[in-house]
Amino acid sequence: MAESGSLPPELDPSRYVEKVSLATGEVLDEPILPEQLLVHKHRDYHVVDVQARRLMSRIVSATGDEELARRRMKEIRALGKRASEALARALRADPEAVSKSLFGLKSKEYFFRFKKHPYGEQEIRATLERLRRQAAERYAAARAGGEPAIRLLLTGGTGFIGKEILWQAAHDEAIAEVVVLIRPKIVRDRGTGEVRRRLSPEERGARLLRQLWLDDDPLRRKFRFVAGDVEEPDLGLAGDDLARLARRITHVVHCAASVAFDAPYEESFRANVVGTLNALRFSHKLQTTPGSPFVAHVSIETSYIHGRQVKAVAREDEIVFPRNFYNNFYELTKAMASLESERFMLSKGLRVIQLCPAIVIGDSRTGNNRGDTKVVNAPVNLFGRAHAALSERKGSFFERSKTSMLARMACVFPGDASAEINLIPVDRVVEGILASLKRPQAIGERVHLATDNRVSAEEIQRIVQQEVGVKVKLAEPTLHRNVTLPVLTTVLCRLKQERLARALEKLGTIFGGYSEWGQTVHAVGNDVRVLGLSPARPDARLAFRMLCRHNRYVQEFGKIRDPDEISRREKIWAELIAELEERWGGRAATMPAAAFQRAVEEALDLERFERRSRTPPAAPSPGTGR
């Protein structure tokens, strides 16, 4: 992390954020460090603070009343403040110093807020009406010939969401062409590090289409892969490519981003803010090119640009700096990127749509994730490997005991039982992205691609036990972060289990901020009103269950990493799930765990992951065995 004064001016958070005095309301001319904008900078610095959060969690667990917990905490803080003042008078000491030293209480003298843009409501309304009218005219002109009208440029096409965009776009008759921005790839020898070959964008694209089962005509003819880099001006495109795209592209979908929740500020900023700025400038160049058919720029953000909004619902029509700060630099820099998108729209007249997914997981029906092992997949895979270790009977008594101890240490999830996590399947997210291309009225809108059917940490615990076979212990997040995790990682490192220690640290980093009580609730509505999606949003519980099943059988809890092999397995898996659902008469996710396991084992040779026969197993009737 860069210290004060060492950040280049273009990375300075004060470009977006200002510090304001609580006493006077004046903007303070003081440097703002990136770490000051994260929640961990403002808490967990005192044992009493940690215990206070444990108490709040217990009150919520016992009563289900978050407001009661907040009231009790305010009462306790007030009592501690009075006690500190009384002791300070007796000792003739500074009350603030006593309060901070004994009880971990400190008075904030300032708050942060995003810098305001200079536009009034009437001016914004007029701008949006004009931009939507322009987009509607351009879209109508593109469709005038009666042929597929949409020709889009996609960044981030090799990522998790990007791959699903390619799959759905291939089967969308309104889309005529998808140009994918992709960097050449250097293949090195794992042993020596020497360069073995250089894969061109065309070679990488052909491999990608094959892995997505899109390598047959006419599907593959819809795609073109060009060399580029979102961190470069003009997206790193060659001049002839740039001129050709200006004459053809109707939409730019900017999906490239860093989703590393533990990345340092500079890395997150360059991937998320600089990349977004380059994409916005590119789209603006297309829009202002004479004769360009450009319709709109679609920016893929995250619903967590709202940070820790624990007292109010995070609204789609505004972005304010959260009084409870941000969980990580990923959220912070995505919020900065969203502000840049808004600025380009209001100051430069760029036609922009902002789409904000929650935590994206695999396909809602199959759990297929194209080989992704990040975010929610990571703990599920860790638990699955721990279960395998607990079931292992090989080795001496000492070796088995050591393996069992390590596996049980891994089966801890930092989560309050009541905490709700907003998981959204990738197919719903991409349905929203492609719908936005056909909705000029979405210009200027911010749309949460989230669900109102969230899953709690307690439900995750129960589903993991049913589907993976391991009893996960829920650890109170604050205590786990400050006490349990440091002890665990120290012990593991002394046992020469650095890899497991890093995995547990990463798990705590990813979920420590998302599994506490009082999580952000994202308003939803624009997905239906603006994009026309189904009001029946995905059930996160069912989607998480299919994630567990997919990771168990298809990925073998992260052991299968080869993209070609995962592609082969996922195709077999998708066919099997479709057949099972036809016989079951409902979603495979609603099948009881034991019945689903029997059906899979009857249908698949799991050693080779091949079908035993083309006749699917007899599935139980819905409602039986639940």
Image (cartoon, rainbow, N blue to C red):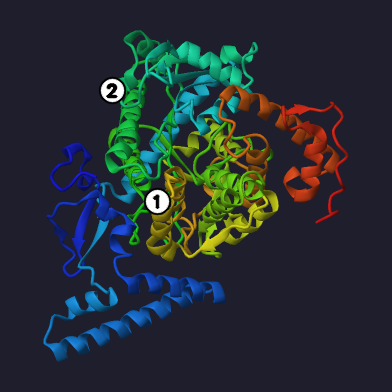
Say if 471 sits above or below 341 in the image: below
* Residue 394 place in picture, x, y as percent: 65, 44
Q: Is residue 519 placed above or below 74 in the rendered structure?
A: above
Residue 451 seen from this side? no
Q: Which quarter of the rendered picture does the N terminus lie within?
A: top left
Q: Amino acid type of disc 1?
A: Arg
> Which quadrant of the figure has residue 275?
top left
Res 288 visible = yes
Residue at the spot x=27%, y=46% of the render? 119
Q: Element at badge 1?
A: helix
Q: Is residue 624 left or right of residue 162?
A: right
480 and 108: which one is in front?
480
Q: Amino acid at mark 2?
A: Pro
Residue positioned 38% across, 54% down in the render: 490
On the image, numbered disc 1 is attached to which residue? 494
Q: Residue furthest top?
A: 240
Q: Position of residue 296 (x, y in %)?
A: 43, 29
| Image: 441 above or below 383 | above
Residue where numbered disc 2 is placed: 233
**Quadrant where the C terminus is found in the figure:** bottom right
Q: Specify the label residue 26 is tagged with.
A: none
